[in-house]
Image (cartoon, rainbow, N blue to C red):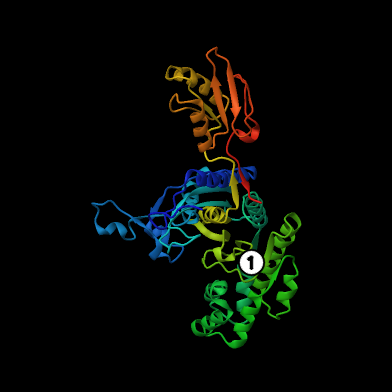
Amino acid sequence: MARKASLSGFPEWLPQERLVEQHVLDTLRRIFELHGFSSIETRAVETVEHLLRKGEIDKEVYAVSRLQADQASASESGLALHYDLTVPFARYVVENAGHLEFPFRRYQIQKCWRGERPQEGRAREFTQADIDVVGDGSLPFRFDIELALVIVEALGALPIPEFTLRVNNRKLAEGFYRGIGITDTAGVLRSIDKLEKIGAAKVGELLRSELGATEVQIAAALGLAGIRSGDTSFVAQVRALGVQHPLLEEGLDELAAVIAETSRRAPGRVVADLSIARGLDYYTGTVYETVLNGHESLGSICSGGRYDALASKGTRTFPGVGLSIGVTRIVSRILSQGFASVSRTVPTAVLVTLAEDGAWSGAQDVAAALRARGISAEVAVEAEKFGKQIRFADKRGIPFVWFTGADGEHEVKDIRSGSQQPADPLTWAPPAEDVRPLVTRSA
């Protein structure tokens, strides 16, 4: 488990913990690129005005200023650290539209900053991994399905427990609410979004007190939110509620298309869950949330959805669909629960010993020959007894120790098994599993 940070909300990993985080990041990069997503990076700061345009989280935004700057730097004309990667990406698309080919497939892995109350799964400095597909003017619905499948593949390759990608559709929900006579659909969505945290009774109270909903409307809204299915049977369940609206039908068709294809390609991973609302107003269609089974209290580890007008330039709009993986949230839970095992705690595969201090230059030649072939090697600190040098390697988790005799002959010892054999620094290589530290899913 990660040690407690001295500055709350700003986690730092020990070397062996960082290996786990790097494994997660490398796995996500590999799978995103297998699906044709290009990597980008945006600046860490945005204008305060731009950051606050898409969501009311002003109390959580970290403003940026020089120590000698005046207080105006925290105003809307000032700068602040980005709290997610979606809003900066919208700006990036607008500013670089003339240089991008659409549909534009992007992934982005960066730090974000948000002034939340620190707890496991919620940090003030954290890493996110986002993927999005953005179109110019229009974007085919099939990308909503493709993004779900990419995320299922990516999360399935990580050393985490079983997970469920829960999908809903904002058109479905908004059409239903209009069909039962509620006009403030955004208000209902914000209330339903709190269902797992506060329960159905309190959500009902919110709908009653804040929106003036009737008991019949409250029962219908909660009835819709209670529908969950791993196949397209949810369509019949919704229609059985007796509500009609054109937008509802459009949402039902879209959600059914997502569930039909994902249940065929990734059975058991994706479910239609009509309680998923996603509080941000810019979502316009499919919405996603992902939870670790048995660890629902951690919250969503990956969420997102379809947005039709997050980015625009004059009359030109850039609709898209995307998801964001909470890397720091996932890594924290992997470490705290021991979901992953690391084969060793350092990258070094070989420690080249020193028979005497004058042998240092020759030892560096051996290490250089190994490194030239991609084998991590370091030279012993000093010419102590070989037993001490071996114990040093063992303490560090270095699996192999290299010896060079007075006659120039070389031998390498696997200190785990005790086997020792002649070796040539120009040709010898460790087994593939020992070339670099391996992170594997714990049993």
Disc 1 marks which amino acid? Asn
- Is 251 on the left-hand or right-hand side of 29? right
Residue 103: in sight, yes or no? Answer: no
Which residue is rendered at x = 55% and y = 13% of the image?
A: 408
Where is residue 70? Give x, y as percent.
24, 56
Front-most of 139 and 57? Answer: 57
Say left or right for 95 vs 66: right
Q: Residue at x 60, y 33 (%)?
A: 435
Instruction: Please name the residue shown 55% across and 24% down the image.
Output: 402
For label 1, the crowd category at 10 Å Cα-Cα, with few meaning under 14, some 14 to 19 and many 20 or more, is many
Q: Please, is residue 75 above or below residue 415 in the view?
A: below
| Location of residue 407 by image quarter | top right
| SS at circle 1 | strand
Examine the rendered structure and indicate whether residue 140 appears above or below residue 411: below
Residue 147 seen: yes
Query: In the rendered picture of this protein, how many numbered marks are placed on residues?
Result: 1
Residue indicated by mark 1? 168
Q: Quadrant of residue 193?
A: bottom right
Q: Front-most of 314 and 268?
A: 268
